[in-house]
Image (cartoon, helix red, strand yellow):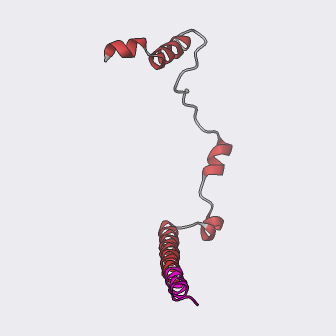
Amino acid sequence: MAFFLQKSSIANHFRSSHRKTEGSLAVPNRAFHVELGDREKALLAKDPSLKRFKSYKKSVWRLKRIGDVLTIVVVAGKASVCYKWNEVVDEFYEVVAMKSMSGQ
């Protein structure tokens, strides 16, 4: 297995991309932490006037659940209609076959 990994192009790709980032111009994976300024802190602060527009987790969960139930009901209804339609079509073909066999 190790032999195939050494010879595979996927392994070569990962090795070559790793070597490219080892240089002095490589961008570090993690940035340095910078403290937020006054403006950013003010923008992130809670505003009491916007509290009535806040969506609460419980109501969002309930609305999602209603959507899921409605989706299931619609799919089940459509499956039922398709099944009943197939029964109607089968009965129609039986009637047509009976009429053609009787010579009418």
Foreground: 8 or 81? 81
Range drawn in magenta: 89-104
Q: In which quarter of the image is residue 27?
A: top right
> Up-down: is 35 above or below 90?
above
Foreground: 8 or 31? 8
Give how far across and how far down residue 85 sits, in percent: 53, 80
Residue in the image at 51% along x and 17% along y: 13
Residue in the image at 59% along x and 66% along y: 54
Q: Is residue 103 magenta?
A: yes
> Up-down: is 67 above or below 34?
below
Give how far across and how far down residue 70 sits, in percent: 51, 75
- In the picture, the quarter occupied by the C terminus is bottom right
Give how far across and how far down residue 41 sits, in percent: 62, 46
Residue in the image at 39% along x and 12% along y: 6
Foreground: 41 or 103? 103
> Up-down: is 20 above or below 100?
above
Residue at the farthest right position: 39
Q: Is residue 86 magenta?
A: no
- In the picture, the quarter occupied by the N terminus is top left
Prevailing SS of the magenta stretch: helix
